[in-house]
Image: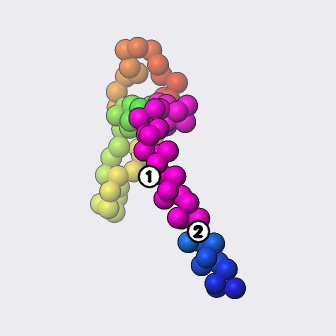
Amino acid sequence: MLVVIGSSFTAEHAVKGVYEGTIGQLTEGIPSDEDRFAQELAREYARFLEYTHRSPSPSGSGFRHSGGSSRAAPADGNAAWC
């Protein structure tokens, strides 16, 4: 049983490595819909973190969300994340 699993795992990663080394390298610079979505999501999350007030936690081991916003909504009016 271990031989089957090991062989399957090895073959899977060998094929994946060949693909990523050839076709993956050629198409790396072409953004897909998924790449654009991830980029926009990261941008919105960064904006959310920038405008969300955070205060030290009582234990002093980091930050926790205090529930309020420390800044006004952005000037462009995009306050959907507020």
Label ID, residue 56 = none
Residue at the spot 47% in from the left edge and 32% down from the top edge: 31
Q: CA distance from mark 1 to mark 2?
A: 15 Å
* Picture coordinates of residue 80, whole percent (x, y): 52, 24
Quadrant that contains the N terminus: bottom right
Label ID, residue 21 = 1
Quarter occupied by residue 48: top left
Relative side of 19 to 3, left or right = left
**Label 2 crowd bin: few (<14), some (14–19), many (20+), radius 10 Å:** few
Q: Which residue is mark 2?
A: 11
The residue nearer to you, when weighing 67 against 73, is 73
Provide the residue span drawn in magenta. Answer: 12-40
Residue at the spot 46% in from the left edge and 32% down from the top edge: 30
The residue nearer to you, when weighing 54 against 16, is 16
Label 1–label 2 contact, CB within 8 A: no
Q: Earlier in the sequence, mark 1 or mark 2?
A: 2
* Picture coordinates of residue 4, whole percent (x, y): 67, 80
* Picture coordinates of residue 35, whole percent (x, y): 49, 36
**Residue 43 showing in the rendered view:** yes
Type of amino acid at the residue the image marks with label 2: Ala
